Image (cartoon, helix red, strand yellow):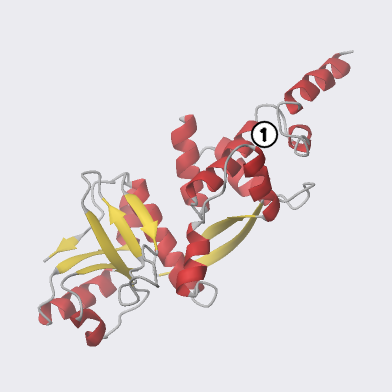
Protein backbone atom coordinates (compact mmCIF):
# COMPACT_ATOMS: atom_id res chain seq x y z
CA UNK A 1 0.00 0.00 0.00
CA UNK A 2 2.81 2.39 0.93
CA UNK A 3 4.49 1.75 -2.41
CA UNK A 4 1.26 2.57 -4.22
CA UNK A 5 0.91 5.83 -2.29
CA UNK A 6 4.49 6.75 -3.15
CA UNK A 7 3.80 6.16 -6.83
CA UNK A 8 0.70 8.35 -6.68
CA UNK A 9 2.65 11.09 -4.92
CA UNK A 10 5.45 10.90 -7.48
CA UNK A 11 2.96 10.97 -10.34
CA UNK A 12 1.40 14.16 -8.94
CA UNK A 13 4.79 15.83 -8.68
CA UNK A 14 5.74 14.67 -12.18
CA UNK A 15 2.61 16.34 -13.51
CA UNK A 16 4.09 19.72 -12.57
CA UNK A 17 6.75 19.25 -15.25
CA UNK A 18 6.08 20.13 -18.91
CA UNK A 19 4.71 17.35 -21.10
CA UNK A 20 7.49 15.23 -22.55
CA UNK A 21 9.82 15.95 -19.63
CA UNK A 22 8.03 14.17 -16.81
CA UNK A 23 10.52 11.29 -16.86
CA UNK A 24 12.81 13.56 -14.82
CA UNK A 25 10.57 13.18 -11.75
CA UNK A 26 10.73 9.39 -12.12
CA UNK A 27 14.51 9.32 -12.61
CA UNK A 28 15.36 11.13 -9.34
CA UNK A 29 13.65 11.58 -5.98
CA UNK A 30 11.49 14.58 -5.16
CA UNK A 31 14.23 16.30 -3.14
CA UNK A 32 16.78 15.98 -5.95
CA UNK A 33 15.13 16.53 -9.32
CA UNK A 34 13.98 20.13 -8.63
CA UNK A 35 17.66 21.04 -8.30
CA UNK A 36 18.38 19.35 -11.62
CA UNK A 37 15.70 21.55 -13.17
CA UNK A 38 17.15 24.60 -11.40
CA UNK A 39 20.60 23.80 -12.79
CA UNK A 40 19.37 23.46 -16.37
CA UNK A 41 17.37 26.70 -16.13
CA UNK A 42 20.37 28.50 -14.64
CA UNK A 43 22.57 27.45 -17.56
CA UNK A 44 19.93 28.69 -19.97
CA UNK A 45 19.32 31.99 -18.17
CA UNK A 46 22.93 33.00 -17.52
CA UNK A 47 25.04 31.35 -20.22
CA UNK A 48 27.74 30.29 -17.75
CA UNK A 49 29.80 27.42 -19.11
CA UNK A 50 31.78 25.91 -16.25
CA UNK A 51 30.80 23.54 -13.48
CA UNK A 52 32.40 25.99 -11.04
CA UNK A 53 30.22 28.87 -12.21
CA UNK A 54 27.12 26.70 -12.01
CA UNK A 55 27.98 25.53 -8.49
CA UNK A 56 28.49 29.16 -7.44
CA UNK A 57 25.09 30.21 -8.79
CA UNK A 58 23.29 27.19 -7.32
CA UNK A 59 24.91 27.93 -3.97
CA UNK A 60 23.66 31.51 -4.13
CA UNK A 61 20.14 30.36 -5.05
CA UNK A 62 19.85 27.62 -2.41
CA UNK A 63 22.07 28.84 0.42
CA UNK A 64 23.94 25.52 0.29
CA UNK A 65 27.75 25.48 0.37
CA UNK A 66 29.37 25.07 -3.07
CA UNK A 67 31.33 22.05 -1.90
CA UNK A 68 28.25 20.24 -0.57
CA UNK A 69 27.59 16.86 -2.16
CA UNK A 70 23.94 17.77 -2.64
CA UNK A 71 25.01 20.34 -5.26
CA UNK A 72 28.03 18.51 -6.64
CA UNK A 73 25.90 15.43 -7.29
CA UNK A 74 23.65 17.56 -9.48
CA UNK A 75 26.44 19.20 -11.47
CA UNK A 76 28.93 16.34 -11.74
CA UNK A 77 26.41 13.50 -11.45
CA UNK A 78 22.92 14.08 -12.81
CA UNK A 79 23.89 16.53 -15.54
CA UNK A 80 26.63 14.16 -16.74
CA UNK A 81 24.48 11.02 -16.52
CA UNK A 82 24.79 9.05 -19.77
CA UNK A 83 21.99 6.67 -18.78
CA UNK A 84 19.11 9.15 -18.75
CA UNK A 85 16.41 9.14 -21.41
CA UNK A 86 17.56 12.47 -22.81
CA UNK A 87 20.95 13.96 -22.03
CA UNK A 88 20.54 17.56 -20.88
CA UNK A 89 24.16 18.74 -20.82
CA UNK A 90 27.36 17.87 -22.67
CA UNK A 91 30.54 18.10 -20.60
CA UNK A 92 34.23 18.07 -21.42
CA UNK A 93 37.31 18.90 -19.37
CA UNK A 94 40.01 21.47 -20.03
CA UNK A 95 43.42 20.93 -18.48
CA UNK A 96 45.00 24.19 -17.34
CA UNK A 97 48.66 24.17 -16.39
CA UNK A 98 50.41 26.59 -14.08
CA UNK A 99 47.77 26.60 -11.34
CA UNK A 100 49.80 24.46 -8.98
CA UNK A 101 50.26 21.26 -10.98
CA UNK A 102 47.58 20.55 -13.54
CA UNK A 103 44.05 21.76 -12.90
CA UNK A 104 41.11 20.22 -14.75
CA UNK A 105 37.98 22.31 -15.25
CA UNK A 106 34.66 20.98 -16.54
CA UNK A 107 33.01 22.94 -19.35
CA UNK A 108 29.23 22.52 -19.71
CA UNK A 109 27.00 22.99 -22.73
CA UNK A 110 23.24 22.52 -22.94
CA UNK A 111 22.30 19.87 -25.48
CA UNK A 112 19.49 20.50 -27.94
CA UNK A 113 17.25 18.60 -25.53
CA UNK A 114 18.48 20.75 -22.63
CA UNK A 115 17.62 23.90 -24.59
CA UNK A 116 14.19 22.49 -25.45
CA UNK A 117 13.65 21.76 -21.75
CA UNK A 118 14.56 25.37 -20.91
CA UNK A 119 12.03 26.66 -23.42
CA UNK A 120 9.35 24.36 -22.01
CA UNK A 121 10.13 25.88 -18.61
CA UNK A 122 9.73 29.40 -19.99
CA UNK A 123 13.41 30.24 -20.48
CA UNK A 124 14.88 31.08 -23.89
CA UNK A 125 18.54 29.98 -23.61
CA UNK A 126 21.07 32.77 -24.10
CA UNK A 127 24.31 32.25 -25.99
CA UNK A 128 26.69 30.60 -23.56
CA UNK A 129 30.19 31.77 -22.70
CA UNK A 130 31.71 28.81 -24.52
CA UNK A 131 29.53 29.32 -27.58
CA UNK A 132 30.75 32.93 -27.72
CA UNK A 133 34.37 31.80 -27.48
CA UNK A 134 33.82 29.34 -30.33
CA UNK A 135 32.06 31.93 -32.49
CA UNK A 136 34.38 34.87 -31.86
CA UNK A 137 37.75 33.41 -30.89
CA UNK A 138 38.18 30.00 -32.57
CA UNK A 139 37.58 28.29 -29.25
CA UNK A 140 37.67 24.78 -30.71
CA UNK A 141 41.22 25.44 -31.95
CA UNK A 142 42.39 27.23 -28.78
CA UNK A 143 40.78 25.17 -26.04
CA UNK A 144 43.37 25.95 -23.35
CA UNK A 145 43.15 29.69 -23.98
CA UNK A 146 39.36 29.49 -23.95
CA UNK A 147 39.52 27.57 -20.69
CA UNK A 148 41.76 30.25 -19.17
CA UNK A 149 39.24 32.93 -20.18
CA UNK A 150 36.43 30.95 -18.53
CA UNK A 151 38.45 30.41 -15.35
CA UNK A 152 39.32 34.11 -15.17
CA UNK A 153 35.62 34.97 -15.55
CA UNK A 154 34.78 32.54 -12.73
CA UNK A 155 37.40 34.06 -10.42
CA UNK A 156 35.90 37.51 -11.04
CA UNK A 157 32.34 36.30 -10.38
CA UNK A 158 33.47 34.49 -7.24
CA UNK A 159 34.55 37.89 -5.90
CA UNK A 160 31.22 39.50 -6.67
CA UNK A 161 32.33 41.06 -9.98
CA UNK A 162 30.49 40.78 -13.28
CA UNK A 163 32.28 39.09 -16.17
CA UNK A 164 31.53 39.01 -19.90
CA UNK A 165 33.58 36.86 -22.27
CA UNK A 166 34.40 38.14 -25.76
CA UNK A 167 32.73 41.55 -25.16
CA UNK A 168 32.91 42.81 -28.73
CA UNK A 169 31.20 42.74 -32.10
CA UNK A 170 33.79 41.88 -34.80
CA UNK A 171 31.76 43.72 -37.42
CA UNK A 172 31.68 46.95 -35.43
CA UNK A 173 35.16 46.92 -33.86
CA UNK A 174 37.48 44.56 -35.79
CA UNK A 175 40.46 46.38 -34.24
CA UNK A 176 39.25 45.87 -30.64
CA UNK A 177 38.72 42.27 -29.53
CA UNK A 178 39.44 41.81 -25.80
CA UNK A 179 39.06 38.39 -24.22
CA UNK A 180 37.09 39.50 -21.18
CA UNK A 181 35.31 42.44 -19.58
CA UNK A 182 35.17 42.51 -15.79
CA UNK A 183 33.18 45.00 -13.74
CA UNK A 184 33.79 45.57 -10.04
CA UNK A 185 30.96 46.10 -7.51
CA UNK A 186 31.33 49.88 -7.81
CA UNK A 187 30.76 49.78 -11.57
CA UNK A 188 34.34 50.28 -12.78
CA UNK A 189 34.99 48.03 -15.75
CA UNK A 190 38.13 46.73 -17.45
CA UNK A 191 38.67 45.14 -20.85
CA UNK A 192 41.21 42.36 -20.36
CA UNK A 193 43.68 40.29 -22.31
CA UNK A 194 44.14 36.72 -21.12
CA UNK A 195 47.57 35.29 -21.97
CA UNK A 196 48.44 31.64 -21.42
CA UNK A 197 52.21 32.19 -21.57
CA UNK A 198 54.84 34.93 -21.59
CA UNK A 199 54.63 36.71 -24.89
CA UNK A 200 56.97 39.40 -26.17
CA UNK A 201 54.68 41.12 -28.66
CA UNK A 202 55.47 44.85 -28.49
CA UNK A 203 53.29 45.75 -31.47
CA UNK A 204 50.20 44.36 -29.74
CA UNK A 205 50.79 46.25 -26.50
CA UNK A 206 52.02 49.45 -28.11
CA UNK A 207 48.54 50.01 -29.56
CA UNK A 208 47.02 50.11 -26.08
CA UNK A 209 46.70 53.11 -23.81
CA UNK A 210 46.75 50.73 -20.87
CA UNK A 211 46.92 46.98 -20.28
CA UNK A 212 44.61 44.88 -18.12
CA UNK A 213 46.45 41.59 -18.07
CA UNK A 214 45.46 38.13 -16.81
CA UNK A 215 48.10 35.37 -16.93
CA UNK A 216 48.45 31.87 -15.41
CA UNK A 217 51.28 32.31 -12.88
CA UNK A 218 53.09 34.89 -10.72
CA UNK A 219 56.31 34.32 -12.69
CA UNK A 220 54.59 35.16 -15.97
CA UNK A 221 52.88 38.15 -14.36
CA UNK A 222 56.15 39.60 -13.06
CA UNK A 223 57.83 39.19 -16.46
CA UNK A 224 54.96 40.75 -18.39
CA UNK A 225 54.55 43.65 -15.96
CA UNK A 226 58.26 44.45 -16.17
CA UNK A 227 58.06 44.40 -19.97
CA UNK A 228 55.03 46.70 -20.04
CA UNK A 229 56.66 49.11 -17.60
CA UNK A 230 59.74 49.25 -19.84
CA UNK A 231 57.44 50.17 -22.74
CA UNK A 232 55.80 52.92 -20.70
CA UNK A 233 52.35 51.28 -20.80
CA UNK A 234 50.34 51.64 -17.55
CA UNK A 235 47.93 49.00 -16.39
CA UNK A 236 46.86 46.26 -14.02
CA UNK A 237 47.70 42.59 -13.78
CA UNK A 238 46.59 39.45 -12.00
CA UNK A 239 47.36 35.75 -12.25
CA UNK A 240 45.08 32.76 -12.01
CA UNK A 241 47.25 30.70 -9.68
CA UNK A 242 47.31 33.39 -7.00
CA UNK A 243 43.59 34.10 -7.39
CA UNK A 244 42.80 30.39 -6.99
CA UNK A 245 45.09 30.06 -3.95
CA UNK A 246 43.60 33.12 -2.28
CA UNK A 247 40.06 31.91 -2.96
CA UNK A 248 40.89 28.52 -1.44
CA UNK A 249 42.16 30.33 1.66
CA UNK A 250 38.94 32.35 1.85
CA UNK A 251 40.47 35.63 0.66
CA UNK A 252 38.22 37.17 -2.00
CA UNK A 253 39.28 40.77 -1.36
CA UNK A 254 41.20 41.40 -4.59
CA UNK A 255 41.01 40.62 -8.27
CA UNK A 256 43.86 42.83 -9.51
CA UNK A 257 47.16 42.01 -7.82
CA UNK A 258 49.28 44.79 -9.34
CA UNK A 259 48.69 48.29 -10.62
CA UNK A 260 51.32 50.63 -12.08
Q: Nearer the viewer, residue 128 or 154?
A: 128
Q: How many marks?
A: 1
Residue 25 in the image: x percent, y percent?
74, 32
* Residue at (51, 44) in percent of width and height: 45
* Residue at (54, 59) in percent of width and height: 107
**Residue 64 visible from this viewpoint:** no
Residue 206 in the image: x percent, y percent?
18, 82
Task: Classify 10 Å Cα crowding around label 1: few (below 14), some (14-19), many (20 and above).
Answer: some
- Residue furthest to the front in view is 172
> Residue 17 appears in which quarter of the rendering?
top right
Q: Nearer the viewer, residue 102 or 255?
A: 255
- Residue furthest to the top in view is 1
* Residue at (50, 72) in percent of width and height: 139
Q: Nearer the viewer, residue 189 or 220?
A: 189
Task: Please say if 154 is above or below 11.
Answer: below
Residue 49 in the image: x percent, y percent?
51, 55
Task: Please say if 11 is above or below 189.
Answer: above
Asked if residue 234 lies left or right of residue 104, the reply is left
* Residue at (40, 53) in percent of width and height: 154
- Reading the image, the residue beneath label 1 is 33
**Residue 126 visible from this viewpoint:** yes
Q: Secondary structure at mark 1?
A: helix
- Pick the quarter of the image with the N terminus: top right
Residue 14 in the image: x percent, y percent?
75, 28
Asked if residue 42 lies left or right of residue 211, the reply is right
Asked if residue 204 lies left or right of residue 62, the reply is left
Asked if residue 22 lies left or right of residue 236, the reply is right
Amino acid sequence: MLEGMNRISRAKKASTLPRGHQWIAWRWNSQFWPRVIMAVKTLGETGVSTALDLLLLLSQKTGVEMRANSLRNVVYGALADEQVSHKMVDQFSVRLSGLGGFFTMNVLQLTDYGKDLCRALGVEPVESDWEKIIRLHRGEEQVVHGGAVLFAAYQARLRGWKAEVMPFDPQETPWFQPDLKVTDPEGWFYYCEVETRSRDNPDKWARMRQANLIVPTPTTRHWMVRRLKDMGIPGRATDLRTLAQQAKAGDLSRFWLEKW
